[in-house]
């Protein structure tokens, strides 16, 4: 018999729990959700922070840098900034600091992920990411691109929408692609995974 069982507390209201939840669950005292990450009980904001640090690692954003950005944002807001507000501020700073670069491209894609988590349309930010890729190509002197559906070597997979399948491997001049943005504008999937490839043998596998 275990005489000295470790006490478990809700990370939101700090009231004691009878049993530690094994997965996301509501606290019986405050009715707020408790999240589980690596065996730890966390608030929603804490769980979002842990999750986003994984995505932000590609940009060299450590927990220390994240919290520094949160502190700076909190001073501006005159209240503690949320994890999502902090992520947005970091991603926006990356776009401003590195325009028309791979960093900006991937920052826009992470913005799409964030707004999607909030129940908003990610397509405008996917378009910004794809436009950034095209602008980068244009700056490098690339004249023509073709659309590539989300695929393997045999072509678009079963989840690629009909609009994108129709566009697969179609060629566009850089200026035409920038004007029409055939993907993601023709996409009906809600999250377009297709992209553009430069018509240059050296960049044949340079996919977004």
Image: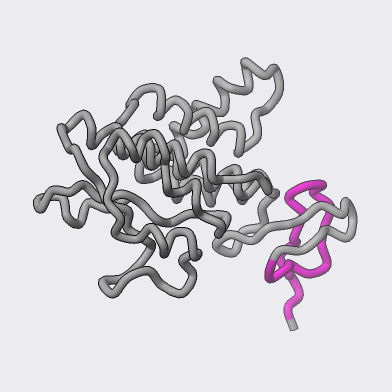
Q: Is residue 86 left or right of residue 154?
A: right
Q: Is residue 145 left or right of residue 160?
A: left
Depicted 62 relative to depicted 171: above or below: above
Q: Is residue 10 left or right of residue 68?
A: right
Residue 60 in sight from this viewpoint = no
Q: Does the magenta segment cover residue 14?
A: yes
Tell which of 9 and 67 is nearer to you. Answer: 67
Residue, far left: 202
Residue for point 45% across, 34% down? 64
Q: Where does the image place residue 102, in percent across and percent down from the top left?
A: 30, 38
Depicted 27 relative to depicted 73: above or below: below
Q: Where does the image place residue 144, in percent across and percent down from the top left?
A: 21, 43
Residue 124 in sight from this viewpoint = yes
Start-end of magenta stretch? 2-23
Q: What secondary structure do most residues of the magenta stretch adopt?
A: loop
Residue for point 15% across, 32% down? 141
Q: Where does the image place residue 109, in percent across and percent down from the top left?
A: 45, 44
Residue, far bottom: 1
Q: Where does the image place residue 196, in percent across and percent down from the top left?
A: 31, 49
Q: Is residue 9 left or right of residue 193?
A: right
Q: Quadrant of the image for the N terminus?
A: bottom right
Count of labels shown?
A: 0
């Amino acid at each position: 018999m275990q005489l000295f069982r470790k006490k478990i507390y809700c990370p939101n209201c700090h009231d004691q729990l009878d049993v530690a939840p094994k997965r996301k669950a509501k606290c019986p005292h405050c009715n707020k959700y408790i999240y589980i990450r690596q065996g730890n009980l966390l608030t929603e904001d804490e769980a979002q922070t842990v999750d986003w640090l994984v995505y932000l690692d590609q940009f060299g954003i450590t927990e220390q840098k994240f919290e520094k950005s949160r502190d700076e944002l909190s001073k501006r807001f005159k209240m503690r900034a949320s994890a999502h507000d902090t992520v947005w501020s970091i991603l926006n700073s990356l776009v401003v600091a590195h325009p028309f670069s791979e960093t900006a491209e991937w920052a826009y894609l992470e913005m799409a992920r964030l707004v999607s988590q909030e129940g908003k349309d990610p397509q405008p930010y996917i378009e910004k990411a794809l436009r950034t890729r095209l602008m980068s190509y244009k700056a490098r002197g690339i004249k023509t691109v073709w659309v590539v559906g989300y695929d393997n070597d045999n072509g678009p997979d079963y989840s690629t929408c009909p609009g994108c399948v129709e566009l697969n491997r179609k060629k566009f001049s850089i200026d035409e692609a920038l004007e029409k943005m055939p993907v993601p504008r023709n996409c009906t999937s809600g999250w377009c995974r297709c992209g553009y490839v430069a018509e240059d043998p050296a960049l044949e596998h340079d996919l977004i």
